[in-house]
Amino acid sequence: MLPPLSDAEVAEHVARIARDGYAILPDAIPPDFRQEICDELDRLESVRPGGDIPPAPFTGQVTRRWFDLLNDGEVWQRVAVHPWILQILSHVLGEGFLLSTMGSAVVGPGEPAQPIHVDDGVYAFPRPHPNLVCNTMWALTDFTEETGATRVVPGSNTWDHDPDHRTRYETVPLLMPAGGLAFVVGTCFHGAGANRSDRDRTALTINYCNGSMRQQENLMLGISPGRMMGFAPELQNLLGFRTCKGSGHIFAQDPRLEMQRHYGDVAAEDPYLARRNALHGDRTARRPA
């Protein structure tokens, strides 16, 4: 169990994110927790080999990305509510922020550098704008220059434009040993580095958004209501069981009460999950250009 961050530690990381666009927390993932996650990734490789999306230039040719993780092992429920993340993001994204998407990023040897991009570009808001997104990058193995540590453009979160893909930017790597965790705010220019090693760079990208924004992953539709009712209240809140500035209500109030009335007696077992992995081949078939 991790002790809470002090108010001073929270303020320090929030200030770094505001100034530089990113911050690194060392020793944020205890070794036993990290091993649980790695074991779960090994299991996913056995049931959905190669990840949940087909190879592509932006997401990677030899990068394995698994999604819909809250329908997999219980460990993902604990990943989503990492206490240090919750402490810091309430100051970065505001109260009522939401879980937006959970994914792995197992970058294989020989993967080239990812194009420089921003994570809030999906909203197409003109800059500058308030923080809409903050990504958290979990180092399950060492983030080094050789293995392709994520590269960031410090201070780019304060710029008035999104990246121009014709421009070459001066970047710095997010160097951290296994167990580190990095925050990268949605306006910060960044991209995975090239993996020039002979081993995987194993990471998670757990993304959160302002509570008034649409989540990238359709979590409220992708997880059965009965299953969600068994989640911890803090995870339910991240999925939308509470309102944010008036949005997300049911009968003009927090949705939790109506969810309990409607689904409180629904079985937590979702029959679809028994055949979900068997559809892996259909999902990952190369799609028409």
Image: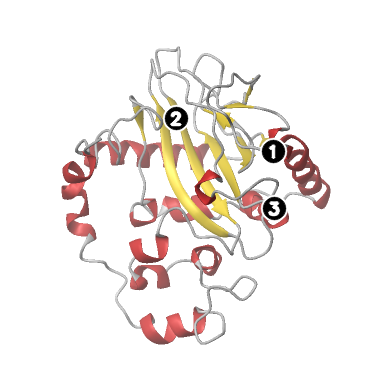
Relative to residue 52, is residue 137 drawn left or right? right
Give the SS element for disc 3: loop
Q: Residue at 76% across / 48% down in the picture?
A: 10
User: Of label 2 and label 3, which has the lower sequence position?
Assistant: 3
Label 2 crowd (10 A; few <14 / some 14-19 / many >=20): many
Give how far across and how far down residue 146 sits, in percent: 52, 13
Which residue is pictured at 63% across the width and 21% down the height? 169
Q: Is residue 109 left or right of residue 7?
A: left
Residue at numbered disc 1? 157
What residue did someone put label 3 on?
Answer: 130
Mark 1 residue type: Asn
* Foreground tag (1 vs 2): 1
Depth check, front residue: 194 or 131: 131
In the picture, the disc for residue 202 is 2
Query: What crowding class fits label 3: few (fewer than 14 Cα within 10 Å), some (14-19), or many (20 or more)?
Result: few
Which quadrant holds the C terminus? top left
Contact between labelled residues 3 and 2, with CB atoms less than 8 Å apart: no
Q: Residue 149: where, in percent of width, then height?
A: 55, 23
- Checking the image for residue 141, the label placed there is none
Q: Is residue 30 visible?
A: no
The one nearer the camera, 3 or 150, is 150
Q: Is residue 125 above or below residue 106?
A: below
